[in-house]
Image (spheres, grey):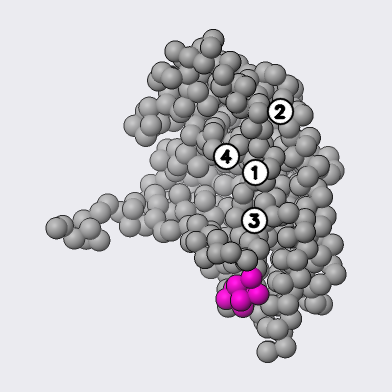
Amino acid sequence: MIDIAKNIAAAPRRTKASVIRELLKITNKPGIISFAGGLPDPELFPYDFVADAVKNIMAKQGRVALQYGPTDGLPEFKEEFIKFLQKHEGLTVKPANIIVTTASQQALDLVGRLFIDASDPVLVEMPSYMGGLQVFKSYGADFVGVKMDEDGIMTDNLEERLNWLRTQDEHYKFLYLVPDFQNPSGVTLSEERRRKVIELSEKYNIAVIEDSPYRQVRFEGVAPKMIYRLDKETRNTDNIISLFTFSKTFAPGLRIGVILAHEQIIKKMEILKQSLDLCSSSLNQLIAAEFLRSGYFEKHIARVNTVYKTKKDTMLNALAEHMPEGVTWTKPEGGLFLWVKLPESMSADDMFEDAIKENVAYVIGSAFHCDGSGKNTMRLNFSYATPAEIAEGIKRLATAVKKRLVAK
């Protein structure tokens, strides 16, 4: 038998197992309350709508639904998505600006394939979405972390990093952002900083990847404009590439994602996607098209936001009641996550086993930092557990924190 470790290609060797996926193996045991995953609440899935939609699609469009489709996506779905962007984001785009992907993870893979050569610097938030880091690392990216605060990525630090890279004659390609209810921190990039990001994109000739899986999951406050829209209204650089998914607003099992970009970028991605899966599921695209066409999206997302707001408030109240002094956390206006900081002297990495003994789980914050820092941080998900489980889980987590503090 061949030596697999010796003979596999560079990209698989660079690809590491997802920390979250590995943690979920541990946290699935009975009795554990898990805040580790990023799972939507399955009680909210629109089972009846999907069943009826499939029945109607099979009756009227069965041959389309079960056949291969165009690599860039079915015209029926793209038409409804264009209307969606116009209605909810004030954007006017053409079919040539859109490619449908097998969820947002394939969109990230297409970004990596299109832009990254081994050892290219890629700018990312600190902390940043782990799935993005995993994909880009598999293509050999060298990460350059940019600091964040409660208003998102710090554009002063971003410009310092870009200027340094340019003086080093490095071939940086793009900046990767999750601007709305960021995973993992839950913070939203302010509109002022979005405008600055566009300005820096033009000044330093760098693409901006605007990854927004949670944008519609807003239950408080006013949404800043999409970076893509701001660019069209101001500089029109065509440097912005926006990624969408219906995993958080509809159902992750459908695996429907969308990339919005300049048509030349979309054409290149279409060629790359041909070698990956030929096309995304025609049936699932037709289901998603009906989801948008019927007006069910608005009804469904309103229900999702009402339920998630209750869960988020429950978690915030429990943190305030049980956590000791010195522990802080973000207060997101939407999304699925919030971010907890322990005192600098504590390690959430080391405390994880203590938490498991208390039958509660989280994701260690260092996994979201490209440089391995952030050991005193953790990500908590509030979308999956029930309010009662959230209240009890935070109480258990606070017990683990207090025991660790006493031990020190």
Callout 3 amino acid: Pro
Residue 379 picture quarter: bottom right
- Which residue matches tag 1? 42
State the SS at label 2.
helix
Vertical position of residue 189 compared to residue 379: above or below? above
Residue 120, percent across and down?
Answer: 43, 51
Check contact, mark 3 vs mark 4: CB within 8 A: no
> Disc 3 or 4, which lies upstream in sequence?
3
Vertical position of residue 200 compared to residue 27: above or below? above
The CA distance from mark 2 to mark 1 is 16 Å
Callout 4 amino acid: Pro
Camera-nearest label, 2 or 1: 1
Vertical position of residue 7 compared to residue 233: above or below? below
Residue 69, percent across and down?
Answer: 43, 19
Quadrant assignment for the C terminus: bottom right
Tell me the number on the disc at residue 297: 2
The CA distance from mark 4 to mark 1 is 10 Å
> What residue sits 37% from the left and 57% below the top?
14
Camera-nearest label, 3 or 4: 4
Q: Which region is colored magenta?
A: 352-359
Callout 2 amino acid: Phe
> Disc 2 or 3, which lies upstream in sequence?
3
> Disc 4 or 2, which lies upstream in sequence?
4
> Disc 2 or 1, which lies upstream in sequence?
1
Q: Is residue 150 left or right of residue 207?
A: right
State the SS at label 4.
helix
- Which residue matches tag 3? 184
> Do we see residue 80 in this rendering?
yes
Q: Nearer the viewer, residue 373 or 393?
A: 393
Q: Nearer the viewer, residue 287 or 135?
A: 287
The CA distance from mark 2 to mark 3 is 25 Å
